[in-house]
Image (cartoon, helix red, strand yellow):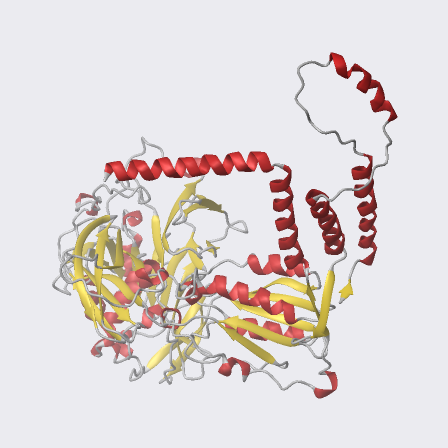
Amino acid sequence: MTLLAPLALLGLLFVPLIIAFYLLRLRRNEHAVSSTFLWQQLVRDVEANAPWQRLRRSLLLLLQLLLVVLLAVLVARPTTERQAGLARDLVLVIDASASMAATDVAPTRLAAAKRAAIAALNELPSDGRVSVIAATETARVIANEASDRGRVTRAIESIEQSAAPGQLGDALKLAGELAERARGAEILVVTDDAASGAPDVAVGAPVRVLTVGMDRDNQAIAALAVRADPSGLKRTVFASVANYSDSRVVRRLRILADGSAITARDLQLEAVSRADVVIDELPAGTRVVEARLTEIPAGEAGAMAGPRDLLALDDAAWAIVPPDRLQRILLVGPGNAYIQTALSLLPNVELYGATAEEYATTTGKDKFDLFVFDGVLPDELPDAAVLAIAPPSSSPLGTVTGTITSPAIGQGGTDEPLLRSVDLSRLHVARAQRMELPDWARMVLPTATGSLPLIYSGLRDGLATAVIAFDLRQSDLPLQVAWPILASNLAGELLGIAPTAVEPIAPASPVELPLGPGVVALRITRPDASVTELAPGATGASSVTFVETRQLGVYRVEAIIEPEASPSPGSSPSPSPSPAAFPSASPAAASASPDPSASVPPSSPEPSDDPGIPVGPEDAPLFFAVDLFSVEESNIAPGDGARLAALGSEPDPEVAEAGVARDEWWPFLVAIALVLLLLEWLVYERDGARRIAAGTRRAMGSLTRTRRRAS
């Protein structure tokens, strides 16, 4: 045994002091007398009593002496030394991803991981140092080479549960970099190892793994989306529910529109399978659709015994309904039946046409939501969304440096929203404009070399803009099935109803929010009703990036308009556009010139019972949803950690010196001290303790008699 603070044994000097107090204490026997007159002489005899008396046996004195000795030994911190089980320098990685919220280990896997990590610190050498990394949506160092066990423990306890997929690969890479600073360092990972594969990373230090979790029983909403049919008159809800359990279960799927339940389906899910649900009757004006997965209450029809759903994070999902406001598109060019047909079939769209000469005299340009320039460009671009096809010259849309003949088609990104359900692998282009990719744009479709863009899109000064570098008539794109889908995706993004704007965002993913004219900041309301204001980082910025998307649910974005930028209430309406409108079923131009201002106004949603969703025709907020649609996190089957341990290197035998770990006795000594304090109180207050015990017995007896009479 070793004492870490031997000077604390000086507290044993209180032992003779307590004994002296007992020796100096006067003791008298109590007697009942009828009068004190005959005892006056004894009062003078008290002064003659000797101050030191023989020490008598006393249980109270013995308990006090034992308590003083115990406290002195406790402060001296006795310890037992043994061989340490961990390296002197330890990098501790704790997985806090969404799957760690599973409740198969009480209360959650993350709480069990924290307990296991704190317990593992007992194997650390007495002079060991610990760095702690939290593997959440990012890898974060929350303690760096700390030698204070209390500080390390507090750092571990401060790790919060994440609703996002964990970046365990990044955490291991960071842990390897920290371990390189100390020779002989070791990495300890505490995780459920529920991912389908090991991270693609090599670690230059030994890796140990502590796993938590026991079961894989979980059901999840794997997908939720809202789509409009080609007529634009009906909205359809698509939901997919996955069962990751080995057992057959029955679950209830509830669909809510703006907080009000509209339908419920009882789903029988086979082991490790999916069930898809399609709901056609979505109320008009719905803004937010919510899906909730619950167990069927016992006693109801269809209820059956089965495993519990161990992860609640993926039992709810949200989808934003694309707005059905009437959109107006102006097609400027010599006339192209392929473009007219594709755009006129879009739902809630009015298509107008004008030649390049007519565009200069067109009135009411501010009434259009999208301008499509086919082979022409005006001297001044409109202050609205633009789609340019084969731009003839350089402009703010991009620099034209020449032409290219029969360019080989490259491959767009797999996550590119404009290429969703679009296959351009068989596209042939006879001639295209040689263009440089602007700074504001992203590459959608490159050439085979990847250096030249054929299609690109982005935000130009806060305005949605896309460019197709080739004339459609110089390609076979209009003859392919992909063309109407690509046109729909382009129009959707440029009109503000793109899949990226309405489909769910992955947790902790950044969201780029455009800033319109006169907008000085954005007010963002999170799912928990907390509000933050986000201002652009630079003057004239066209967008801001919101990164605080850690909560699951619906976010509301409202624009804060500069006061002088607001329109005057008495201002007169803008002139109506003058070009001809294309009939919705025909690519040919019509002779009439309808006034878009007299068209059907945007629909106003019905009031919602959910206070978190604004209503009213004057409200025009932007909504986006953050959902956990991750197979990696919903499939919570725990692993054994062997594949993670294989990522590390073998221990260096030259530095594999085992340190000395210390086990302190203070928890055991504190428990004994508390027992002694209780015994001392019982001895000192024995009369009061007897009265309390007697009163408790009487109360229990009275309660028993009352129950007997009641029965």
Q: Position of residue 505 (x, y in %)?
A: 38, 61
Q: Residue 493 falls in which quadrant of the image?
A: bottom left
Number of marks drawn: 0
Which of the pair 71/297 is nearer the observer? 71
Which of the pair 640/183 is nearer the observer? 640
Q: Is residue 155 left or right of residue 410?
A: right
Q: Is residue 621 left or right of residue 40?
A: left
Give the farthest residue toward the top.
37
Which of the pair 4/525 is nearer the observer? 4
Quarter containing the C terminus: top left
Q: Residue 304 falls in which quadrant of the image?
A: bottom left
Q: Is residue 559 left or right of residue 55?
A: left
Q: Position of residue 305 (x, y in %)?
A: 22, 66
Q: Position of residue 439 (x, y in %)?
A: 49, 65
Which of the pair 277/346 is nearer the observer? 277
Vertical comparison of 328 with 662: above or below = above
Q: Residue 179 falls in which quadrant of the image?
A: bottom right
Q: Position of residue 218 (x, y in %)?
A: 32, 68
Residue at the location (26% across, 59% down)? 294
Say if residue 394 shows up in the picture. no
Vertical comparison of 503 with 431: above or below = above
Quarter containing the N terminus: bottom right
Say if residue 656 shows up in the picture. yes
Vertical comparison of 37 with 90: above or below = above
